[in-house]
Amino acid sequence: DGGITQSPKYLFRKEGQNVTLSCEQNLNHDAMYWYRQDPGQGLRLIYYSQIVNDFQKGDIAEGYSVSREKKESFPLTVTSAQKNPTAFYLCASKRFTTGGGTEAFFGQGTRLTVV
Amino acid sequence: AQSVTQLGSHVSVSEGALVLLRCNYSSSVPPYLFWYVQYPNQGLQLLLKYTSAATLVKGINGFEAEFKKSETSFHLTKPSAHMSDAAEYFCAVSDEGGSQGNLIFGKGTKLSVKP
């Protein structure tokens, strides 16, 4: 089945540690996204990538880093510089068409907790 | 800049009653609009999307939404609520015709359904 796989589903991190969240898609989509979700704040864009080996900062990129070495993979690293990393993280992908209006497909999310 | 405002962070209805979730958007280009649903600790699932083909859009699970340009609105409705509709709902806008095609999300509306 085609889709987006995020792992792990739950992740615990000690303060001062870097952690990497995995996101893999087999939909052959060009664009991939990372969102952070906090209660009552909706989804906020962290980073996005529209093509391999290129990515752009979103609205809340500070304390995060990404790479896009393969079309299928877009891992997110939460660094120790991120002051409040406890949140639900969602990865998404989408394709572009000349007609426009393509929707994003989402993974099941990773819940990160700092202990 | 684009933005989305969802009126009401919580909406409660009785089973069998009309569901109305409000969404207003702001966009400098013709918008593409989306409604997504999220169940607890899950990713987002697309309910429906508006891509300028028709102003009344029908989606999954009996939901529909009407695009009203004069009111800059894209409200989500369902004639009769089911218990299984209890979830969080997100409205989103995309400037697919623009440079990035990123999705901008509202803060979400949590729907409760009373027996």
Image (tube, coloured by chain):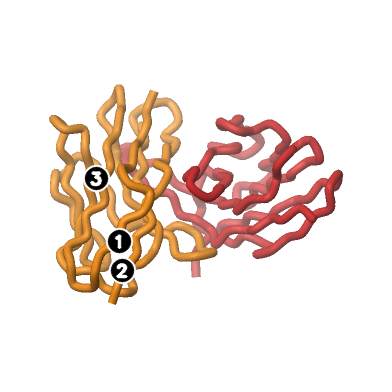
Q: Is residue A63 left or right of residue B98?
A: right
Q: Quadrant of residue A10?
A: bottom right
Q: Amino acid at mark 2?
A: Val
* Nearer-N-terminus badge (3/2): 3
Secondary structure found at label 3: strand
Label 2, on which residue?
Answer: B113
Q: Which one of the lettered chains is coloured orange?
A: B
Q: Position of residue A11 (x, y in %)?
A: 73, 60
* Crowd tier of the residue under label 3, counting other residues whose Cα lies within 10 Å: few below 14, some 14–19, many 20 or above: many
Q: Position of residue A71 (x, y in %)?
A: 60, 47
Mark 1 to mark 3: distance in Å?
Answer: 26 Å
Q: Is residue A12 left or right of residue B58?
A: right
Secondary structure found at label 1: strand
* Nearer-N-terminus badge (1/3): 1
Whether A58 is drawn above or below B59: the answer is above
Q: Quadrant of residue A111?
A: bottom right
Q: Which mark's residue is nearer the viewer, 1 or 3?
A: 1
Whether A86 is drawn above or below B16: the answer is above
Q: Quadrant of residue B73?
A: top left
**Residue at 46% across, 47% down:** A94
Whether A45 is drawn above or below A87: the answer is above
Numbered disc 1: what chain? B
Q: Colour of chain A?
A: red
Contact (CB < 8 A) between labels 2 and 1? yes
Q: Amino acid at mark 3?
A: Tyr
Numbered disc 3: what chain? B
Nearest the eye: A99 or B38: B38
Label 1, on which residue?
Answer: B12
Label 3, on which residue?
Answer: B50
Numbered disc 2: what chain? B
Q: Position of residue B72 (x, y in %)?
A: 21, 33
